[in-house]
Image: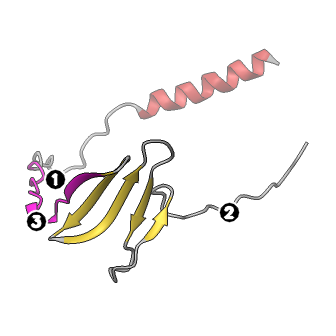
Amino acid sequence: MRIPLAVIALVFAAAAAAQSQPRPLPPGSKPLEEPPPPPLIQGDPALEPQVTIRKEGDNTIQEYRVRGKLYMVRVTPAHGIAYVMIDQKGDGQFRKQDNLESGLRVPQWVLLEF
């Protein structure tokens, strides 16, 4: 059993070694020049969120705004689990979320069970 496995591994190793040699350029072609580095994209400072942190009683409230518009509020109580309220449609109606997951659920089925 070990000998056939060793032979198969040797065949795959030989095939990989044969492919590791650089191929010669076709006649009449020249190598490409080194490409320039990608341009640095400067972010718009107006699109960076402004975070305001305030305390109300035992709760710490973080308000996130872009261009002055409130879009997310994170509430961290002194005793308990933090939660997030997000204005998903931009209409001023905030909906509570326990975490920032996208809500995408990948279907999972049991195919075989032993």
Identified at 10% across, 65% down, the residue is: 46
Residue 23 belongs to magenta span = no
Report whether 44 appears left or right of 49: left
Marks 1 and 3, how far apart in space? 52 Å
Instruction: State the quadrant of the N terminus.
Output: top right
Label 2 or label 1, whichever comes before in sequence order: 1
> Residue 95: x, y in percent?
46, 71
Q: Please, what is the three-letter code of the amino acid marked with disc 1?
A: Gly
Marks 2 and 1, how far apart in space? 53 Å
Residue 109 vertical placement versus 58 (above, below):
below
Identified at 81% across, 54% down, the residue is: 110
**Residue 107: mark:** 2
The magenta stretch is: 36-55
Report whether 88 appears left or right of 102: left
Question: Label 1's element?
Answer: loop
Instruction: State the quadrant of the C terminus.
Output: top right
Question: Label 3: which residue?
Answer: 46
